[in-house]
Image (spheres, rainbow, N blue to C red):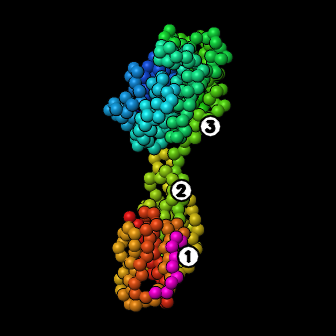
Amino acid sequence: MKNKKIIILIITILINSFLQAQDTTKILFIGNSHTFVNDLPQTFYQLATKAGRIVYVDNLTMGGATLQMHLQNPATTLKINEKHWNFVILQEQSQIPSFIPERDTMMYPYAIALDSIIHSNWLCTRTMFFMTWAHKYGDLGILQNGGTDSFEDMQQRLRSGYMTIADSLEAAVAPCGWVWRQFIQSYPSIELYSADNYHPAENGTYLAACTFFASIFKQTAVGINYFGNILPSDAVVFQSVASQLVLDSLDLWNIGLYNPKPTADFGYVQFGNQYQFSDSSLLTTDYKWDFGDGTSSVLQNPTHTFLSTGGYDVRLISRNSCDADTITKNIHFISTNLSNIELNNFVVYPNPFVDNVYIESLENDVIQRIEITDPKGKTIYADETVKRNLDILDLSSLKKGIYFLKIHTTNKSFFNKIIKL
């Protein structure tokens, strides 16, 4: 009996561990001192845990690091590939996103490359950009060189810099800098900056953590009983300002836009009792076809032969590592005399082809009509000129891909798959 209880306990622990792993939100922060000063990842972790969320939080940060430096650092790629992260946070150096037009070459190519690495590791990971805050009085580099700038001007440029790349990648944005802007306008007496006027004081880090909580979980941070070293009365204000600005504009920050769920769809072309099915699903890696007659396939673009006239519900289940989608189409099959091209009737060459296709009749058949369709069944070429023996088709205008050739003679019809290189 004792051994049985131990086995039950072990099984219970394993099941709970599995369920917890399934429910854990895994977040990776990639950035520099704006992320590691006052330990923003840990502050976020404490907020999320006190809110009842199960989270795993990690970070890879280097002082003064740019996204280019992270891309060139093997440790960054290793860290991205370490887990199936739910969110990877990208934070650029504090000034580069505000440089116009230099950010086009100094930031965007590296952001795009990192985003690609993130999704190559796991399709379901959401890239989120950490929109940082402007320097307290404007860009320090501009001011130190005798130029003029302001917090408001720099923050507008930072917003533009982050939103442009985020929109192009359909990535989310944690609008920490824009929350800072709102907070400074509403509560100018509460200091967010450290003495250097660009790194965050603990107030600023806490405000950023509240912004990340609302951005990642799409839930208000108001009422979370974690204050760190912040005055509780101030913390409630930070929670409120961050949550309201994020949750009132989820679409603006692309929060919730990303949907890695696949979309199932397909087309088909009939050749007699044979059907060529063509997948047109989105974000799909695995396929399961049910042809409605007791047979199935896991090919992306299967060919299937129905043996008797009737209606068939053909179902496609499209899957990726995140989710699945299903679509069913009813096909009413009526037998015809359409058959495959046979060598003793026609020769079609070359196949694959580049520009021209030659059709040669070996039995002096009279060709009444030649038709070419795409995988969805749309006719893209038709010729009804009556001819014998040999025909040359100029198909140089077609795009590369798979097509279906139909040849109609006086007594019969034939088909063949052709490939344009």
Picture residue at 43% right of the left edge, 34% below the top: 105
User: Is residue 57 positioned above or below 365 on the image?
Assistant: above
Residue bearing mark 3: 251
Sooner in the amino-acid sequence: mark 3 or mark 1: 3
Nearest to the eye among marks 2 and 3: give it. Answer: 3
Sooner in the amino-acid sequence: mark 2 or mark 3: 3
Magenta stretch holds residue 384: yes
Q: Which quadrant holds the N terminus?
A: top left
Q: Dot 3: few (<14), some (14–19), or many (≥20) neighbours within 10 Å? A: few
Sooner in the amino-acid sequence: mark 1 or mark 2: 2
Q: Dot 1: few (<14), some (14–19), or many (≥20) neighbours within 10 Å? A: some
Amino acid under disc 1: Phe
Picture residue at 62% right of the left edge, 35% below the top: 252
Q: At which x and y percent is residue 87? A: 48, 34
Structural distance between the alpha carbons of marks 3 and 1: 46 Å
Q: Which disc is residue 264 wearing?
A: 2
